[in-house]
Structure formats: C-alpha cells, structure tokens
Amino acid sequence: MQYAHDDFKRNYDIVEAAVEQNGRALQYVHDDFKGNYDIVEVAVKQSLHALQYAHESSIIRNQVVSPVILKAIKDDPDGRLVFHKLVEDKTQANIITILVKADRSFVDLIDDHGRRAIDRAVPDCKVAIELALCLFEKFDILSDTPIIQKSPTTCVFKALDKTNGSFVALKCINNHHQVRHCLRCHMNNISLIQS
C-alpha cells in the first residue's frame, strides 16, 4: 500500500485485502480507513502493531471498545510492546484514555526491562492515564486514607479533585431512593441558606 495509487488507498475492498495480509499497511491507507472500525479490527487481527496507526474513533463502537483490540493487547505476545509504544507517543493520548477506561490493568503492563506502562508514559499520555483511572475522570479516591463514613446505604471517601487540586468528600449511595432523598435534602438546605 505504501506505493499504491491514491485510488487504491481509498478503495474499501483493496484496503481490507491489504490490511488482512499485513495489518501494518494501515499506516499507508487513506485517513478515512484509519478511522473505520471494521478495517482497523481486520488490521489488528493480523498485526497488533496496526493499532499505532488507527484513529481513536476506530476502536470504539456504541461506546464499547472493540473486544478484538482488547483481547489482542492482553493475549498477543506483542501486546505489551505495542501498548508501551502507544504510551511513548503523545499523539496517542486519546487512544490510551479509551483503552485504560476499558481495562485498567493495561497501565501495569510490564516491558522487557520491568517498567510499567504508566511509568514509561510521556507526560501527555501519563496525564491521560491518570485521568482515565479517576472516578468520572476527575476524582482520585485516595486509597491511603480511611473511609470517612460508612452506613448500610452510603459510604463517604476523601478524594482529590484533579481539576483544581482541592480535597473533597465523595458520598456513594447504593439505593436510588436514598439518592433522591439526599438530593431533596440538599436542595432544601440550599433554599434555606438563600432565604
């Protein structure tokens, strides 16, 4: 595909056949195909290294990351290597975010020198990983601090708001009726304060 005419690089059937033979050929196809879920899956099945050339939109469909890609990273002998290459490339931060949200264990993939992916990541990718590991991409629940409060229906944790560096208390409620009750009480308290 590298030396193919642009018309061939834009033809679905030709591109599909090319990446089926050599997944790395994805780097030479038209950009539209680098963002095509089906083409990228075919390429990754042939060579996980093709993931380096994929657009972030191509690895997710209906808000679910391609199971083919997740399985390839976990099971392919090159999975660790490819993930480590991704975290060393700042242009891959969005793909890293998507992959880490789908499987948090990727950050602990070890390279041949015993280094974890999160420790090797370039700054942009490290920030992407840290935010993907946070609750709602905002709160880092501090594991070294005790639970503030625990009851049969709620649990309150100390967390760091990564957007502004302040500490907050996060209240987790396990019953939707209790959530509604807490919200009503909270809104009533706001109304009393404003009065």
Image (cartoon, rainbow, N blue to C red):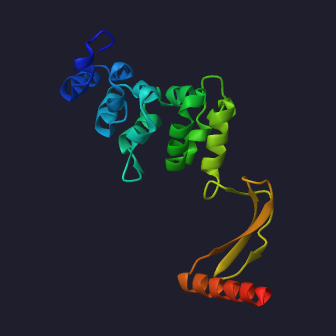
Asked if residue 16 lies left or right of residue 182, the reply is left
Q: Quadrant of residue 147?
A: bottom right
Question: Is residue 71 something that shows in the picture?
Answer: no
* Count of labels in the image: 0
Q: Residue at x 25, y 24 (%)?
A: 10
Residue 24, x across and y down, in percent: 37, 20
Q: Residue furthest left?
A: 13
Question: Is residue 42 something that shows in the picture?
Answer: yes
Residue 82, x across and y down, in percent: 50, 27
Q: Residue furthest front?
A: 195
Question: Which quadrant: the C terminus?
Answer: bottom right
Q: Quadrant of residue 172?
A: bottom right
Q: Residue at x 74, y 57 (%)?
A: 161
Q: Residue at x 63, y 87 (%)?
A: 184
Question: Which quadrant: the N terminus?
Answer: top left
Is 44 situated above or below 94?
A: above
Is 44 situated above or below 5?
A: below
Residue 55, x across and y down, in percent: 43, 34
Q: Residue furthest top?
A: 3
* Residue placed most toward the observer, 94 or 150: 94
Q: Residue at x 43, y 24 (%)?
A: 49
Residue 75, x across and y down, in percent: 43, 35
Q: Quadrant of residue 53?
A: top left
